[in-house]
Amino acid sequence: MAGPAGAEGETAEPRKERSHTRRMRPPVRRNLQKSVLAVKEESTSKEAAPAAVRPKAPRMRQEPTQKAPEKEPVRRLTEQKKEKLPAPQAQPDHAKPASRTSRNKERVVSSDRVMAAFRRAADVSSWGSGVFTFHDASGKHGGIVIAQTRTAFEPSYEILGEFSDGLALIEDKNRYGYINTEGKIVLPAVWDHAVSFENGKAWGEKRGKRYALDTEGHETLFPAWDMGYSFHEGLASFQRNGLYGFVDEAGTTVIEPVWEKTGRFHEGRCPVMKAKKWGFIDTEGKLVVPTEWDMTMEYSEGLGRICVNNRYGLMNLKGQIMAEPQYEFVSSFQGGLSIVAHNGKYGAVDANGWESIELKYEFAAPFSEDLAAVELGGLRGYMNRKGELVIPAQWDDCYVVSEGRAGVCKDGKWGFINPQGELVIPVVYDQVMQFSGGYTCASNENGWTILDREGKQVI
């Protein structure tokens, strides 16, 4: 079993969509799309700059990560498809709705035939909301399986990004659009370039002009720039002549492009870089923390992360240091706790910077549903928010808890436990995916299948 490592480094570099942690070699083929025990965190680093990219098979954004101990974290499955880089140019205009009537039709093939192909697929990806796609051994797109409706079909399009705001980015005949969780095209594939929705907004380009889109298909023409990125707290970064600034949802420039790199706004603060040093600005563009750090990372629960000489600490919204930069790894705050690592041991600190959970574990992943996966004596289990090992370290590998289920591995076979540590799905599968939308995908000698939370085979 691979050893632990600092889970999630985060940076201000533009997203290439999902994944900010060092990875433990997965006991699976390249077909499993998402990491489980690794946490999706978005951040900023000294070598970062926002970018939206088209996903390439298998949450989302390339961002340099903070350094972590040499051991690797609990498994991360294969990477998201990268979104195509938009090449926007636009002039101001009024908002206008786009037709939701799609001229891109799904090519429906016998459900039985698609189901049979799914079971013997070489490559399966989960896009969230119980929607799965698969490829055969040659890499040919096989089709889509939707667990909720127990349907399967072979469409003309291919999914490029995970579901967000109920929509997923697709490519159809070199044009881009969006489908809903039933697999229906609801925003037509008419865009030359597009990115996934985030916070109710997405970007699309057609005929050399760039638009902001909402989930209803309304389009707002934006000013010309070299590149634009996702909205966070009502502001989106853009690049012009190699420098970054911010616009609001009406397309008005509110922060002039003067920064070499930026992150994203969280809790009214955004990491920015100038002369290769990082600080924080507020929503008016005022520098509230001087650019004197090697790295700064987005705020969570009132605390931002800072780095100097490869050591990480914590700073509050007033710019006061709450924990001196001394850790090899610091996670974002979740429920008042941040996972930290020092001298290869993991524990947690509270909002005052006190080590509220002793640094005694060989690895610890950020909390999910009040449990954190940990490693002790080379095996994995789960601790609660008091640092107590409530699920014994008895597993070779494991996932973070998701939707009340956590994947666990023993002797190369996978199953699922509940938050009480009780086995609810037998450890008999060669590969499993994290639960999403109430379903997981698993494989054994009989091929791929889809299970519900009780382990019942629904497809």
Image (cartoon, grey):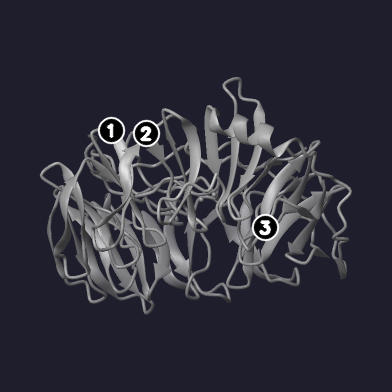
Q: Quadrant of the N terminus?
A: top left
**Spot occupied by residue 294 in the image (x, y as percentages of width and height):** 36, 54
Name the disc covering residue 430, or none: 2
Mark 2: give few (<14), some (14-19) or many (20+) Cα within 10 Å. Answer: some
In this orientation, does residue 240 appear? no
| Mark 1 lies on residue | 412
Q: Where is residue 86 in the image (x, y as percent from the top left)?
A: 71, 46
How far apart marks 1 and 2 lie (CA) works out to: 7 Å
Up/down of 304 relative to 66, above or below:
below
**Element class at badge 2:** loop
Give the amino acid at mark 1. Gly
Q: Looking at the picture, how far across and down is residue 19, in whole percent?
A: 45, 47
Mark-to-mark CA distance, 1 and 3: 35 Å
Of marks 1 and 3, the one in the foreground: 1
Residue at 68 percent across and 64 percent down: it is: 201
Discs 1, 2 touching: Cβ within 8 Å: yes
